[in-house]
Amino acid sequence: MSGPARTYLDATSSEPLRPAARAALVSALADGWADPTRLHFEARRARLLWDEARESVAAELRCRADEVSFPASGTAAVRIGLRGLLLGRRRAGDVLVHTVVEHSAVLRVSQEHATTGGGRCRKVGVAGDGRVLVDDLATAVREEGVAVLACQWAGLESGAVQPVEEVAAICGAAQVPWFADLAAGAGRLPAPDGWAVAAASGHKWGGPAGVGVLAVRKSSRWRNPSPRDDRIDVRVAGFENIPSVLAAAAALRELAADRVMEKRQRALTDRLRVEVPRLIPDCEVVGPSGQRLPHVFSCSFLYVDGEALVQELDRLGFAVASGSACTASTLEPSHVLTAMGLLTHGNIRVGLTADATASDVDRLLGVLPGVVASLRDRVGAPQ
């Protein structure tokens, strides 16, 4: 395939496979294929690899190894984790409180809870920078009948990192368990504490696709929402995908250890936050300047169609995203940007990979003003 050199800037959707993950995957394909529930040597060797992966992920999430499970995706982890927490808390209440900027998997569990589960839901708003309104959250959590709070650690659309210490304190005082979506920040920032059940996704940090992470504290009232399977882990059904799980754990460990990368990415996204609105009029930068993910930059342009912008940048060799981070294939207006009260059209989201360079950012800044001007000219918009 000929054309311009490719620059991948969509790590919010999926981080390329990390070198450590590739090496672990190849090694585990040779050593981790056997059934880890059996007693022979090959099975014991596979079981050791499985245990190693659990211990590695648990260390990064600040929990016990036996609290970690590996469903088939982050979405599956959300569904199993949140449904199980609601099921285990049925005697305490039937109200699910969640922020308006949660991943679509959380929103769908919420809808299911209200329509077929006979429960109630309460939504908590966010400020214009995407961070939850803490006073409103505290009020909602303290109401009678609240079973669970679902609040993400950080959002991939805005890059906003939520005030998780305050969230944990509010839930602790109200004795309401916190379901935490950790997918956006895992491996990139030190993981928060205070959650009861958490979910994450291996491909977000450079592991292979098909590996979710579900962590259930021993102290939480969680009940499995699905029939139990006779495997190593009673929380997740099916034969264990040990090579992919081990690769995901290796990627998480490698990413978390690279604090130089975090500083480099933050400096690059800081530059984008300054330069893009300086170079292009009628531009709205998304998310907070301070409490945010280091690798995410998002902005919206007036008089521009987001799909056309992504396609034109793709033609020039740049892979970026638009629309909602969890439902991007639909290119529907983002529920996150809507909740923040921002422009929902003309949006692009840059997710820097671990290997992204200043040169990548320079080249994007070199073409973006011309692309936006061209698209505005097509529709006769003011320049």
Image (cartoon, rainbow, N blue to C red):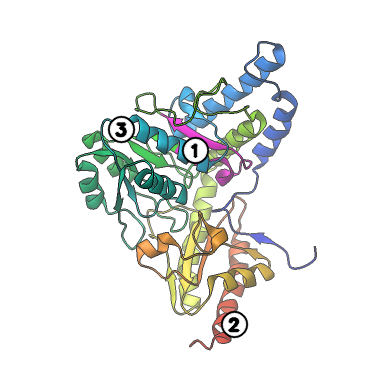
Q: If you read the primary sequence from the N terminus, does the residue marked by circle 1 or circle 2 appear first?
A: 1
Crowding at label 3, few (<14), some or many (≥20) Cα neighbours within 10 Å?
Answer: some
To which residue does mark 1 refer?
77
Residue 176, given in percent of the width and then of the height, sits at 27, 36
Residue at horizontal 68%, vertical 66%? 317
* Chain-order first, disc 3 or disc 1: 1
**What residue is rendered at 39% in x and 24% in y?**
218
- For label 1, count other residues whose C-alpha is less than 10 Å away and answer few (under 14), some (14-19) or many (20+): many
Q: Which mark is residue 90?
A: 3
The residues tagged by marks 3 and 1 sit, at their Cα atoms, a distance apart of 20 Å
Q: Residue furthest top?
A: 39
Residue shown at the point (39%, 64%) measured from the top left = 338
Residue 289 in percent (x, y) is at: 39, 60
Name the foreground residue: 242 vs 251: 242
> What secondary structure is found at the residue carrying circle 3?
loop
Which image quadrant is residue 34 in? top right
Identified by mark 1, the residue type is: Ala
User: Secondary structure beneath disc 1?
Assistant: helix
Look at the picture and state if 62 lies above or below 143. Answer: above
Confirm or deny contact between disc 3 and disc 2 (CB under 8 A). Answer: no
Residue 229 in which image quadrant: top right
Instruction: Give the labeled residue for mark 2.
Output: 374
Could you say where residue 334 lies in the image, as x and y percent from the top left?
A: 45, 62
Q: Is residue 205 magenta?
A: yes
**Numbered badge on residue 9:** none
Q: Which residues are magenta?
A: 199-216
Residue at 52% x, 31% y is 57
Residue 269 can be seen, yes or no: yes
Q: Indicate left or right for 238 with 6 as reference.
A: left
